[in-house]
Image (cartoon, grey):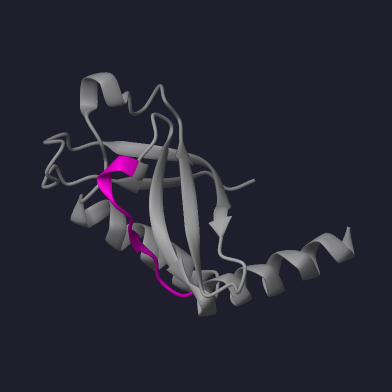
Amino acid sequence: MQTVQFSTSGDGYWSRQQKTVTIVDMRLGYVSDDKDFGELCVYFNTQDWDTSKDGLIYTDSLFEAELNAFLAAQGLPSASYSEQGMQGDDYVSLDVEGDFIRAWEAKFNAFAQMS
């Protein structure tokens, strides 16, 4: 299994840390009933990034750029940071739109049916 890592540039409003962060999972959190919008939670290794010491990854431009490049390589549309209050101690919260949700479901529902 490939390890997925994104870097931070330290240009976010809540952190000046420049680090490599290992991603351990990505999940759709909330999805609206009509599937027009939702939340993508990008979970990170808390040994790499400790929000109590490092702050929030939220608003870091390099992390968002590398995440969106990764998503594009997977055939998924881009995501953008959600609001500050939605950020977690072990995940970055991002807003996604209906096209992302449809692409995510098509990709992962097809994968689940193959297993």
Q: Is 23 a magenta residue?
A: no
Q: Quadrant of the N terminus?
A: top right
- Name the residue rendered at 32%, 23% in the picture: 50
**Which residue is more in the foreground, 8 or 58?**
58
In this rendering, the answer to whether 24 lies above or below 71 is above
Residue 94 in percent (x, y) is at: 39, 56
Camera-nearest residue between 39 and 57: 39
In the picture as drawn, the residue positioned furthest to the bottom comes out as 99
Kindly indicate the quadrant of the structure image that contains residue 21: top left
Residue at the front extreme? Answer: 33
Q: Position of residue 6 (x, y in %)?
A: 35, 48
User: Which quadrant of the figure contains the C terminus?
Assistant: bottom right
Question: Which residue appears at 16% of the width and 34% of the height?
Answer: 17
Q: What residue lies at 57% left-to-right and 70% top-to-bottom?
A: 101
Q: Which region shows up in magenta?
A: 77-85
Image quadrant assignment for residue 5? top left
Q: Is residue 89 left or right of residue 29?
A: left
Count of numbered marks: 0
Q: Is residue 79 left or right of residue 29?
A: left
x and y percentages locating residue 80 in the rendered image: 33, 63
Q: Is residue 85 above or below residue 27?
A: above
The answer to which of 23 and 79 lies nearer the viewer is 79
Image point (29%, 51%), residue name: 83
**Image position, residue 103 (x, y; %):** 60, 75
Left/right placement of residue 61 relative to residue 70 reads: left
